[in-house]
Image: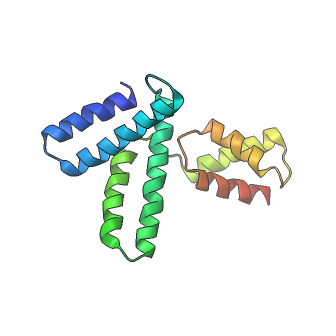
Amino acid sequence: MLIHQQIEQDYLTAFKAHDQARVDVLRLVKAAIKNAEIDLRKHELTDAEATTVLMKEAKKRKESIAMYRQGNRPELAAAEEAELTAISSYLPTQISDEEIAMAVGAAVAELKPTPKDFGRVMSAVMAKIKGQADGNRVAAAVKQLLK
C-alpha cells in the first residue's frame, strides 16, 4: 500500500473514531501531498515523493517546536510535537549516527574531496540515504570528516 493510501485510510479511521487531533494532522498532510501532486503535475505521487513531502512537513514541525520553546510557549510546542509524532509514523526509520558516519566515509573515499567540496559530499550522501536521516545530522558528520 502506498503511503498516501495509508494516510487516507488512517484519516477515515480517525474521522469515524472522532479523533479530532489526528484528523486535523492527517488533513494537513493530505493537503501537502495534494499540493505536491499539483506542483509536479502528477496524478499520484510515488512513495519516495510522498516521503519527501512528509519530511518537509516534519521539518516544519521541528522548527516550530524550537521557536515555541524559545518563546516560552510550551502548550503550542506540545501540540506541534503531537503533530510531529503523527507525521513521523509514516516516515522510514531513521538510521543511526554510526551508519551516517559510514555512508559519509564511503562517499569521501569515493570522491576524494577537498575541504571545500562539502556540497558534493552532501549531495552524494543524501542520494544514498534519502529519507533515512535528517540533513542536519548528515551535514555535521560531513563537516567533521572534512576538517
Q: Quadrant of the N terminus?
A: top left
Q: What is the residue that sits farthest to the top in this orientation?
A: 43
**Quadrant in which residue 110 is drawn:** top right
Q: Nearer the viewer, residue 40 or 115?
A: 40
Choose between 115 and 32: the one closer to the eye. Answer: 32
- Residue 46: x, y in percent? 47, 26
Give x and y (percent) for residue 62.
45, 58
In the image, is 34 to the left or to the right of 96? Answer: left
Split into 4 quadrants, where in the image is the C terminus?
A: bottom right
Residue at 34% over, 45% down:
28
**Rendered image coloring scheme:** rainbow
Q: Residue at x 64, y 36 (%)?
A: 128
Q: Is residue 131 above or below residue 71?
A: above
Q: Position of residue 53 (x, y in %)?
A: 47, 40
Q: Return the x and y of residue 81 as percentages of the image width and height.
A: 35, 59
Q: Residue at x 55, y 47 (%)?
A: 133
Q: Residue at horizontal 66%, vertical 54%?
A: 139
**Most extreme residue toward the left, as rendered?**
17
Observer able to see residue 100? yes
Viewer-proximal residue among 111 and 99 = 111
Q: Quadrant of residue 123?
A: top right
Figure check: 131 above or below 80: above
| Residue 93 visible in the shown view | no
Q: How many marks?
A: 0
Asked if 33 appears above or below 56 in the picture, the reply is above
